[in-house]
């Protein structure tokens, strides 16, 4: 559906150790809408709240205040419905090293009850896309870090999720492998209308891949928009200038 909002938050707040002397406000009153088919980038320094936001949206954390909806369902009430339709690839995702590349995909997809014939078809397609078809029967314990990451990306996509959350999807992947992953994410968005939410420290990747970007700092959403619109708004030469200026408070001025 055109312009359908698939993720929405209102005043979303997360406080760790609430009421104690050392309480930490990880998210502060975040209002956000993401539409179907968007590639949306979440950027910010370490500890800005990016991972906390994603963990709330997939039901791994409960918000302290505010609300969040994914695919029209409240994350505190209908998380089982949501989890069947979304996938999360964390930065430190585990992999079954004694299984082959294909077995990793098939095992994971089998947990979702995908019929064997369809599961093998999807595995064939994804292994081809991430350039691992020739290595499909090799145990992944012998793979490089970048090759393992490509297996994990393929594994996350085997269930054909409506929404894909990816934390640093190209970490440890070489230049060619990173291009493969980016092209795959573009295809999912443009041709299959799937929604991608990714975090990354690679601002060139954000500029190339993301339709819109949200900048988090100290738990607050300090800016949101298309990369070129943010550059124009803050009179910056590139997204890096916008980002560093907003985080440090120096060098950018809202027009």
Image (cartoon, helix red, strand yellow):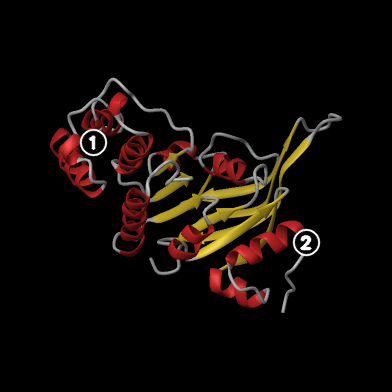
- Where residue 99 sits: x, y (%)? 26, 23
| Left or right: residue 59 compared with residue 28 | left
The Cα–Cα distance between marks 2 and 1, rounded to whole angstroms, is 50 Å
Quadrant of res 134: top left
**Quadrant of the rendered image containing residue 137:** top left
- Specify whether residue 226 is in view: no
Locate residue 83, reporting x and y percent.
43, 39
Provide residue 126's location: percent of width, then percent of height: 23, 45
- Furthest-top residue in view? 98
The label nearer to you, 2 versus 1, is 2
Please, is residue 251 above or below residue 159 in the view?
below
The quadrant in which the N terminus is found is: bottom left
Q: Is residue 236 above or below residue 165?
A: below
Q: Which mark is residue 114?
A: 1
- The reply, left or right, for residue 232 in relation to residue 41 is right
Quadrant that contains the C terminus = bottom right
First of labels 2, 1 by sequence position: 1
Secondary structure of the residue carrying tag 2 is loop
> Residue sitting at 65 percent across and 76 percent down?
233
Q: Which mark is residue 249?
A: 2
Nearer to me, 170 or 70: 170
Q: Is residue 233 above or below residue 195?
A: below
């Amino acid at each position: 559906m055109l312009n359908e909002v698939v993720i929405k938050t209102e005043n979303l707040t997360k406080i760790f150790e609430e009421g104690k002397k050392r309480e930490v406000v990880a998210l502060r009153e975040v209002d956000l809408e993401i539409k179907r088919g968007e590639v949306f980038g979440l950027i910010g320094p370490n500890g800005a709240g990016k991972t906390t936001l994603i963990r709330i949206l997939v039901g791994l954390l409960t918000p302290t205040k505010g609300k969040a909806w994914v695919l029209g369902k409240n994350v505190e009430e209908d998380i089982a419905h949501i989890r069947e339709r979304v996938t999360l690839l964390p930065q430190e995702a585990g992999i079954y090293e004694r299984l082959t590349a294909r077995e990793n995909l098939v095992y994971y997809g089998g947990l979702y009850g995908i019929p064997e014939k369809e599961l093998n078809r999807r595995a064939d397609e994804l292994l081809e896309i991430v350039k691992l078809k020739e290595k499909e029967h090799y145990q992944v314990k012998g793979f490089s870090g970048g090759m393992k990451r490509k297996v994990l990306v393929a594994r996350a996509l085997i269930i054909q999720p409506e929404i894909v959350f990816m934390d640093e999807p190209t970490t440890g992947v070489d230049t060619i492998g990173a291009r493969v992953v980016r092209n795959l994410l573009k295809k999912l968005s443009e041709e299959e209308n799937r929604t991608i939410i990714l975090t990354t420290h690679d601002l060139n990747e954000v500029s190339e891949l993301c339709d819109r970007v949200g900048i988090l700092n100290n738990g607050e959403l300090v800016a949101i928009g298309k990369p070129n619109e943010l550059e124009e708004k803050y009179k910056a030469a590139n997204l890096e200038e916008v980002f560093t200026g907003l985080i440090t408070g120096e060098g950018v001025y809202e027009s």
